[in-house]
Amino acid sequence: MNLYADLADDYYCNMNLSTEMALPNGRETVLGFLERVQKSYPSLRNFFQRENGDFVLEQDKESGQQRWISIEPRRICSGALNQTAIEDAVGQHELVLELIPYMLSVSQLDCEALDYMIGFDFLYRGNHDELVADALGVSPSYDAFMGIPGAQVLNFEPNVTLALEGSCRRQARLVIETRTNAYQVRRDEFPEEPLSVYFTVRQYGSLGPDTSFLDSLTALRANSEELLEQHVIEQVLRPIAQTIASR
């Protein structure tokens, strides 16, 4: 069952692993790792190196779906857009985490942070910041400020990070990213662009000797799904979708 496909125009499920030490960047090592991933996901056939040195293997964006893997100097990213089932995305992330200890020499000790992120894009032609303020409301302390006659909202991007336990090693972050600028507001001309909501659960620090990357990803996913269901879907995502639909 897909929990997220009907909540926004696009959704994506990403995994990011940041390392303390630099990752291998030799030709044989990088290509060997990506070729092994490609065996399980043959649609990943576009390989290139960015100007900054990052290596990327990605799928053509077909029927609104896409997969990608990137290797940065100290980060490995695995992403999937609009997969039919959330397990189709998570399976890719699990494969990457299974392979990296053997093919990229990444150990649990080398983990700086592991992220599980669910993102949502809402296409909207209009003032994104004004829409977010209307959909989610503002603190009563800001009511007078927001009600200044003739004023228009230019920036309203809620961004909250919470520690989920006493050591602050596991954190949850909710970010709303708008794409409206002052030039568009001044001219009252708005392109149709995505308004994005990102929800990330992150584990900081090295993993214990009895904890694998897969175990950590499973725990982060469970944590994410619980928090999304209880605190984000009805409180943030649906109000934004409903406000867009009403305009």
Image (cartoon, grey):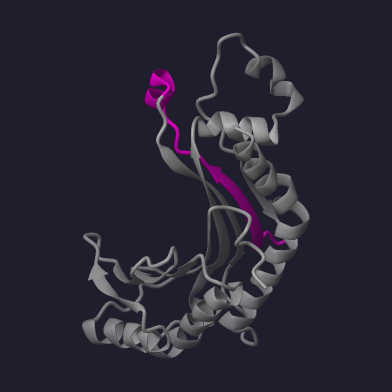
Q: Nearer the viewer, residue 5 or 51?
A: 5
In magenta segment, residue 191: no
Residue 164 in sight: no
Snapshot quadrant of residue 38 = bottom left
Q: Nearer the viewer, residue 175 or 179?
A: 179
| Residue in view at x 33 percent, y 69 percent | 60
Judge whether residue 206 can be spotted in this image: yes
* Residue for point 59% across, 73% down: 85
Query: Residue at image x 60%, y 62%?
Result: 5
* Quadrant of res 137: top right
- Does 187 appear in magenta? yes
Q: Residue at x 24, y 70 (%)?
A: 48
Q: Quadrant of the N terminus?
A: bottom right
Percent position of residue 146, x then y = 64, 19
Nearer-the-camera pick, 48 or 41: 41
Q: Position of residue 83 (x, y in %)?
A: 52, 70
Above-or-below relation of 77 to 146: below
Is residue 138 left or right of 90 when viewed as pictured?
right
Quadrant that contains the C terminus: top right
Quick check: 196 left or right of 147? left
In the image, the segment drawn in magenta is 164-188
Which residue, as the protein is rendered here, is positioned at the far right? Answer: 230
